[in-house]
Amino acid sequence: MTTAGESLDSSPPLGFATRNRGDSLWMPSPPAEERGGVPAALTVGAVVSRLRGLVEREFPGPVWVEGELSNCSYPGSGHIYFSLVDEQATDRRGQRLLLPCAFFRGANQSLRFRLEDGMKILCYGHISVYEAKGQYQIQVLRVEPKGIGALQVAFEQLKKRLAAEGLFSEARKRPIPVLPERVGIVTSPTGSAIHDMVVRLRDHFHVIILPAKVQGEGAAREIAEAIRLANARRLADVLIVGRGGGSLEDLWAFNEELVARAIVSSSIPVISAVGHEDHWTIADYVADLRASTPTHAAQTLAHTRQRLIDEARTLTQQLVDVMRAMLDEQSAALDGLRERLRLLHPLIQIKEHVARVQELLRHMTRGVQFTLERCERHLQGLAGRLEALSPLAVLARGYSITMAGPERHVVTSSASLRAGDELETLLSRGRVVSTVLQALPEAPAEGNHP
């Protein structure tokens, strides 16, 4: 075999070259014995057998060989055939050196990614001769991508392929129900994620747990089956598919195409909740909503429901306040109309007129009473003045009035009287009837003498 930088043509012809093998010197078998001066001919089988022996003695056990993939094919048998190309070494004609490889079905079942031309890989296997074609090849036992891990390559390949199908498109994804009644959880019933999710969800929703392995052999199949079961029986209005954190290997079930297809085919909206915030899986890309953690998925649903409940309560209270204000306003208007209607009622009108008449009567009575009181005071004043001028007042001071004759004229002079005339004298208290015995003439006043 050649190494990088060597040319196939630089090797000596078979049967005549020597080659160092470790610390010993290896010499090929001598040529066939001649018979009668003519070399004995070798059969094709003998040559191929001797070539195989040479190769197997040179490479007694499996080796790692690195190179670039070329001519990769996937026949229906399940085997994978390809060539490894040395990017550095060429033959004397400038052709790159190729090493055929056969990756049989029994060995390639554990391959996580798809082999593609141009990929830099490391192959581990036995170097042997394929007798039917008389060519050397590697019977591959294991393949690893060069530079990055096999899982990462498989992840990128599947991501690229599903993205090309449009499975990551936001237009394809379904909205998460705003107020779901039932929430299904596809996860391990014994994992750390289930407890936190149930605690946060049970006060708001009816929680259905769909148990499934989330790690190891068969995990992807169980997750996909749980999603299909939830859809077939319509067990939930929204599904949370996920698990707690872990390594890439631990989370690999959520990078399987089987799980991705199940999420895409689900008629129930799916929230992916795998690992921690910095973990992204294929399930995250195809799910209708990605939550950074299982707890975050539960919090998102619970918070949304609580926020809507709070908003509904606020709007309800606002509606009640507005309706109460409207009712108060309408009630006040109705009271005003009722009062106007009451005032327009005939009985009310009569009562109001009666009250008005009564008020006028009270007004008039007070006016009359005031006038009478004023007149009385005036009359009393006049009576006082009259009394002061009245003869009766003079009588009270000891004077009297004498009247004579049937005409009862006041006697002011004795000259008008005759003896025998009957007189009536008024006193301050009572009266006296008398008869004139003698009428005397008026005596002259003092100071009037001649």
Image (cartoon, rainbow, N blue to C red):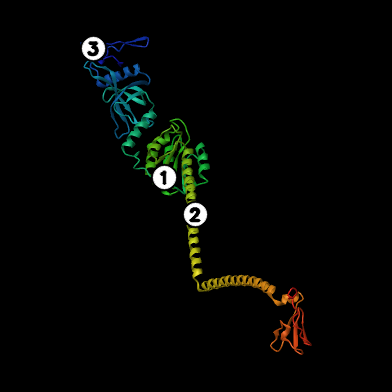
**Residue 47 location, x and y as percent?**
27, 19
Amino acid type at circle 2 is Val
Report the residue that reaches farthest toward the front. Answer: 450
Alpha carbon separation for disc pair 2 and 3? 117 Å
In the rendered structure, find residue 34 and report the number of the disc placed on it.
Answer: 3
Quarter-of-image position of residue 217? top left
For marks 3 and 1 on the same chain, the one whose residue lies earlier in the sequence: 3
Q: Is residue 279 visible?
A: yes
Q: Secondary structure at mark 2?
A: helix
In the rendered structure, find residue 301 and report the number of the disc placed on it.
Answer: none
Residue named by callout 1: 176
Residue named by callout 2: 320
Check if mark 2's residue and mark 3's residue have beta carbons within 8 Å: no
Alpha carbon separation for disc pair 3 and 1? 87 Å
Q: Secondary structure at mark 3?
A: strand
Amino acid type at circle 1 is Ile
